[in-house]
Amino acid sequence: MEDKRRFRNHISIIIEQIGGGILALAVLAVSILLQSAEELAETDFSFLHGKTLIVILAVLGLLAVSVGNRVFAWANTYICIEENAIVIERGKVNKKKNTIGIRNISNINIEQNLFEMILGTCKVKLDTNSRSTADSTDVTIILKKADAAKFKAEITRKMQGQDPVRDPAAEDEAFDIRAEFGDVFSHGIFSVNIFSLLILIGAFAGTVVTVVQILEKPNLLSSLLGAAAGIIVAAGIVLSALWDTVKDFIRYYDFRVKRRGDKIYIRYGFLKKMEYTIPVDKIQALKIRQSFVARIFHRYMAEIVNVGMGDEKEEQNSFLVLYSTEKKLKEQLELLLPEFAPTAEQKVERLPGSVWAAWALPGVIYALVVCISAAVCVVVMPKYRILIWLGAAGMILMVLIGMVLKYKTDGSGADGGFLKLCHGYFGKNYISVRYTNIQYMEIKQNFIARAAGIRRGEIHLLASSANASHGIPYFKGNLHERIRQGMLERENRNTNSGF
C-alpha cells in the first residue's frame, strides 16, 4: 500500500453492523407468531389494512432508513495511511477526520468470525496506548484477508521505522508452543465455571420437566404452541449456560504462541479466529489464574495485561499459557516472557490475623441489617417466618464463608522488582506487576485497621478499566514503602533521561 492511498472498509461491514438487530427482531417475531398460532390460523388476515398496515409499513420504513444510513456512512468513510498517521475520514456534508499517530499504536490484532471466514474477510483492530481510549478499540477495519495482511505489514513497518522485513506472524513457520487437542480439552475442563455448570443442570432439568408435562396434555399441538415462547426462553438459558461451560473447548482450538524478538504472536480459534501481535514493552502485568477445579488439581494458566487491549469482551482474556502444571507453566514463561518468569516463584504472604478485626464492624452491620429486614418480613408474612429466618441465616452464613475463603486465599508480596497480589474465593487470581509500571497507588486505613497496625490499598495501571485498578489486600509492615520506592526509581530514571 502506498502512502496517502484512500480505501474503504469491505462492504460486508454493513451486514455485520445491522445483522444482529435484524436477527433479534426476527426471533422475537417468530416467538410471538408461534405463541399466537391458533388465533392466526382462524383469521383470514383481513386485519392487515388500515392502522395495522400503516404500523407494519412504518416498521419496514424504519428498517429501510437504518440500512440506507449504514450504506451512506460506509460509502463516505475512508481510511488513509499517511507517513506518520492513520486518518479516518467520515461524512460528506459534516466531514470529520480522526487522526491516530503511528507511534501511539500499541497493538495490531486480526479477528475473523464465522461470517467473515465464509466471505474471506477479517477485522483489523488497532489499539493505542492512551488511557483516554483504553476502553474502546480505536480503529476497527474490515478488509479482504490478503488486504488485511498488507495493511498490517505496512503499519508494522511504519511503527518500527524501517524497511519491510520478514514478518514471523505472516509466515507458516513453527510456533514455540502449539496446543494439541488434549491440551485444549484439558484447558476446557479446568476452565469450567462451577456456578455455570449448576445453572446448566438446573435449567436443563427444569426444561425436561416442563416438556414432559406438556407431552402429557391431551391437546399436544395446542400446548406446544401456547408454551413456545417459554420453551424458547428456557432453551436460551440452557444454551447460554452450556456455552459458558464449554466455550473454552472451542475458543482456544489450535492455540499457538511464539516469541520473536520483542514481540509475542498468538493465534487461536475455531468459530472465531484471533491473531494477536503484542510488543513485549507494552505488557503491564502478568496474571496467573486458578479456577476452583484447577486449584484442586494444582493447574495454572497465564494471561497478560497489555496497553490498549482488554477493552472488548473477547480481549479481556489475553491468554499466554493454557492450563498446565506448575513446572510446565514456568518453562513456557521462560520461553515466551522471561522478563516476568521470576515472579512465577515469588511468594505471597497471607492476610494477617488482625484482618478479622477490620472485617468485624462491617460484618456485624450486615448481620443486623439482614436480621431487621427478616423481622419486618415476618411481621408482614408471619406464615413464612421459618423460611424467612432460614433465608436470613443462609445470607449471613454465605458472607461468613466468603470471609473465611478470602482469608485463606488473599495475600500480597514484594520481591525482585515485582508486586504480586492474590485474590479469590474458590479459585485464585494472581497478578504480578513491576513497580515501574504502576501509575499511582492509594493506601487506605480506617480507625480499626490503624489500631490493628494493618493497611490495604489499590494500584492503577495504564490499561482498560477491566485491568486498570487492582486492590492490595490488607497487609502488615512496610509493603507500601517498598512500592513507593520502586515507583520513585522510575521517576528518577525519567528525570535523568530528560523526560
Image (cartoon, rainbow, N blue to C red):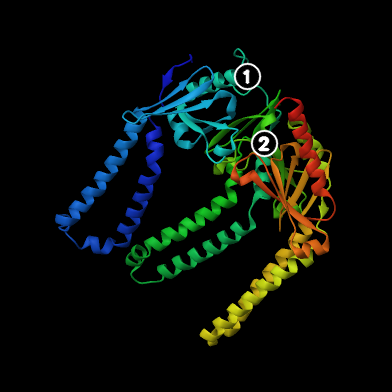
Mark 1, secondary structure of its residue = helix
Mark 2, secondary structure of its residue = loop
Residue at x 65%, y 22% (from the top left corner): 173
Q: Residue 231's quadrant in the figure?
A: bottom left
Towards the viewer: 409 or 118: 409
Residue 328 visible (yes or no): no
Q: Is residue 151 left or right of residue 490?
A: left
Discs 2/1, front: 1
Q: Is residue 201 left or right of residue 225?
A: right
Q: Is residue 77 left or right of residue 499?
A: left
Q: Amino acid at mark 1?
A: Gln
Q: Is residue 240 above or below residue 266?
A: below
Position in image of residue 269 (x %, y %): 57, 36
Q: Which residue is mark 1?
A: 160
Towards the viewer: 95 or 431: 95
Q: Earlier in the sequence, mark 2 or mark 1?
A: 1
Q: Residue 489's quadrant in the figure?
A: top right
Q: Callout 2: 10 Å neighbours few (<14), some, many (20+)?
A: few
Position in image of residue 392 (x %, y %): 63, 76
Towards the viewer: 362 or 24: 362
In three-dimensional space, the C-alpha distance between marks 2 and 1, rounded to whole angstroms, equals 34 Å
Q: Which mark is residue 180?
A: 2
Q: Is residue 416 above or below residue 191?
A: above
